[in-house]
Image: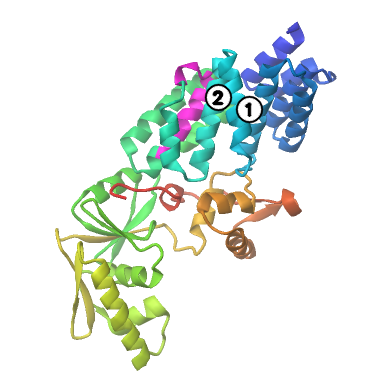
Amino acid sequence: MDSLITAAARSLATGDPLRALNFIALRDDPPALALRGIAMAQLGDLARARTLLRRAARAFGSTEAIARARCVVAEAEIALVSRDLGWPAKPLDSARAVLERHGDRANAAHAGYLAIRRLFLIGRLDQAERSIADLDTASLPNASLAAYQLVVGGMAIRRLQIKAARTALMHAQSVAREVRIPSLVAEVESAVRVLDTPAARLIAQGTARPLQLDDIEALLASKALVVDACRHAVRQSGKVVSLETRPVLFALARTLAESFPSDVSRGMLLARAFGAKHADESHRARLRVEIGRLRKTLREVAGIEATKDGFTLKPRHGRDVAVLAPHTDEAHATVLALLADGEAWSSSALALALGASQRTVQRALDDLKADGKVQAIGRGRARRWMAPPLPGFPSSLLLPAALPGG
């Protein structure tokens, strides 16, 4: 490797792409093309970066397997940054195997980290955690180690394991400050602030107050009956009753919990669960049926008793009932939660991360765009969606993950 290539590589490692380009901007040999691609990625021109890396991979000869594998790893990283989550995982796995076989442990470990990061972004936390056990973290370069600890912290936040999240993010912060890459430092510090930012509302006995993640972890570990409006479930003492696919039952459970210990009139329940403004006998009959279904579904954690005017909730264990609610009851909160990371997402990537159809996500984006909450960039297949930062937006509670007891 000549001196200019070496100098450019060192500049890129310290997050200085402009200095790197000063050394190689006019060169078209394969190593220079690869480094130019990485430099353009650091400058934010991801489309140009991918083109350069693909040219470099083609230009490297068949005997230069390590160099070609490194290009594949770099392209995979760009795919993740650009939220191209449908990018095939097999080329990255193959590149990692080549790098391990040839003793390039640092880049092989980086490839492993990228695979874990992709699993995290699409909400496959169980798979990501299993992959962590096979990752050679000791071989990760410091910049990659900080980013890896960000992912570990992010997974712990989604699991509401806040002590573990703090440990990982403090480690990421220490390493990021050591490598002195401004964008990495800013990303880590933004993640650290999430730990001390109100993440949801606690609604109990007619009052509401903000909760931080530590408070939420403590609430779910308590004996209180919690109607979780972030994950659409009812929780108590480790028992979880999911109502994610039963919106009517969840609406009834939330209404009853918000009024506890008082009862709720039949008219209020009809309005909240069915949107009925004027109840007739068919509405009342349907309410009786749905209350019966809810009573059966919640039988292990709570009972539902009829009163003169309506119904009241009766927890089986403990005396406290609370609703854990997002800051806002925005209809498309999960889409906004993903866009809250500040990156530009395609509708297909959003659909993959949320486990929804692309058409469903597109309708949500159209509604949010009409309300001025998101903006589109580009056209056709290149179209991406972004949202302005939302202070205190509880993304960690709205994204796919199993909370304690789930």
Secondary structure of residue under mark 1? helix
Q: Where is residue 369 in the image (x, y as percent from the top left)?
A: 64, 61
Q: Position of residue 68 (x, y in %)?
A: 70, 22
Within 10 angstroms of label 1, few (less than 14), some, or many (20 or more) residues? many
Which amino acid type corresponds to the residue marked 2 in the rendered image?
His
> On residue 73, which mark appears?
1
Report the span colored magenta: 137-155
Image quadrant containing the N terminus: top right
Report the side of 29 relative to 184 (left or right). right
> On residue 116, which mark appears?
none
Which amino acid type corresponds to the residue marked 1 in the rendered image?
Val
The answer, for residue 37, to whether it is visible in the render is: yes
> On residue 110, which mark appears?
2
Residue drawn where x is 69% and y is 31% of the image: 41
Q: Position of residue 15 (x, y in %)?
A: 63, 22
Q: Tags 1 and 2 in contact by the CB under 8 Å rule?
A: yes
Q: Which of 334 and 73 is in front in this view?
A: 73
Residue drawn where x is 57% and y is 23% of the image: 97
- Against 31, residue 187 (above or below) is below
Secondary structure of residue under mark 2? helix
Residue drawn where x is 41% and y is 50% of the image: 397
